[in-house]
Amino acid sequence: MEYSPSAKELSRFPFLKKSQDHIKSRFSSLDFLFTDPKGAALVERALSRIQEAITVKKTFTPEISGSADDEIAGYALSRIIVSCVHDKTLIDRLTRYEADRAYYFLVNEEEWNQNFQEGEGEYSRLCIAIAQELGIQITKDRIPLVDYVELVAPLHQDRFNLVNRRLEHGFVEIKKDERYELLRERIRVLLRRDLPHKVPSSLCEKLAPGVAQLKKVYQEKMLQQFGAVEESSFPPCIQALVTALTAGVNLTHAGRFALTTFLHTIGMDANAIGQLYARSPDFDLEKTMYQVEHITGRGGSGTEYNTPACAAMRTTGLCIHPDALCEKVSHPLSYYTAKKREQKTAGKKS
Ligand code: SF4
């Protein structure tokens, strides 16, 4: 007999097709979001979900507030809102949050764990149903090699390396707890793959007040995270770009893009970035400000671009003089936060 999860269970895994089908009839039109007080409450709920996703310390609780249907709808709406914002980092944060939340329920839900028995019980049936919908034949102790290799590619722990694994008849042995970690990764990848949605501009316009509020909170959180701008913590690649500019060298488009997005993300405002470019020999104020505003999302499109990761920096020849810390990071912004932390600790000690 096909397993039918309860509405409460579905609200814990709102990305499942069964969960979306569950609310389809109730939310056949999105007009009520803007005409009904209940709709406005739902928009608020979706915005809170995104704000929780961008909070460094996340808290998951077994009980949801409000109805299961609202919880599922809040999930779907939050994906529409981040699609309107169109910021890659924000989308990454939301999908990671959803995957972590599902992991929390898979691992910790007490009631299900009480029902859990090896190979049977409602909890196990739910876990199998989720794995099936995610398209992987994962059991509590093994997973097909092909699925395993794809899933562990972004995971950096040594224990996931194939050389540290037992292989048998095309399957990789896993521990029961690792099953949840692999499911979490699968959820993250699948949820990320579908975003951003193509949302009609008329709908984004109606959501604009909420989106503006969200952008403000997001900007504040990013600034809190990066703190005051400290040039001494810049990674070698960014230092090299600043030095080149100061020496009057014209930067390539890729170099300008990397430098502008980096400085914007760590909290430098568009005018200060523009002033930096004034050192460039071909400086043109109007053109420079247009480019800076376009890249930082203040121009017409509203899209904020992200600093390229180290792999992309290498491809464009911008990874200059990498040092020991570079070996531990995969993104110039991670270098910056790590270096700031390092300098702060060293400062306290001295
Ligand atoms: S490894 Fe990354 S952070 Fe270090 S210099 Fe290269 S691009 Fe910059």
Image: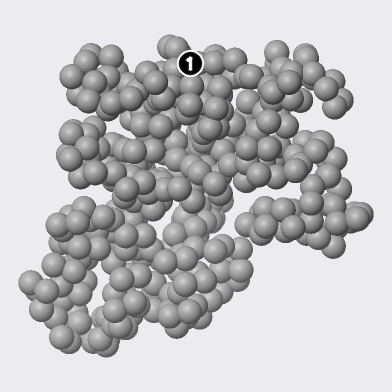
Who's the residue at 44% across and 36% down the image?
A: 53
Residue 138 is drawn in which quadrant? top right
Question: In front here: 236 or 253?
Answer: 253
Who's the residue at 50% across and 69% down the image?
A: 310
Label 1, residues with CA under 10 Å away: few <14, some 14-19, many ≥20: many
Residue 117 percent across, percent down from the top left: 84, 20
Left or right, 333 with respect to 270, comes to right
Extreme residue in the front direction = 1
Q: Is mark 1 within 8 Å of ligand 1?
A: no
Residue 200 is drawn in which quadrant? top left
Compared with residue 264, is residue 203 higher up or lower down, i.e. above or below?
Answer: above
Q: Which residue is mark 1?
A: 68
Question: In front here: 103 or 148?
Answer: 148
Q: Secondary structure at mark 1?
A: helix
Residue 99 percent across, percent down from the top left: 56, 38
Who's the residue at 28% across and 26% down the image?
A: 29
Residue 271 percent across, percent down from the top left: 15, 61
Question: In front here: 236 or 201?
Answer: 201
Compared with residue 222, is residue 304 higher up or lower down, i.e. above or below?
Answer: below
Tally the numbered discs: 1
Question: Can residue 343 be seen in this snapshot?
Answer: no
Compared with residue 70, is residue 98 higher up or lower down, i.e. above or below?
Answer: below
Who's the residue at 56% across and 62% down the image?
A: 329
Left or right, 198 with respect to 350, comes to left
Question: Can residue 345 be seen in this snapshot?
Answer: yes
Q: How is the image coloured?
A: one colour
| Amino acid type assigned to the residue bearing label 1 in the image | Ala
Residue 259 percent across, percent down from the top left: 32, 70
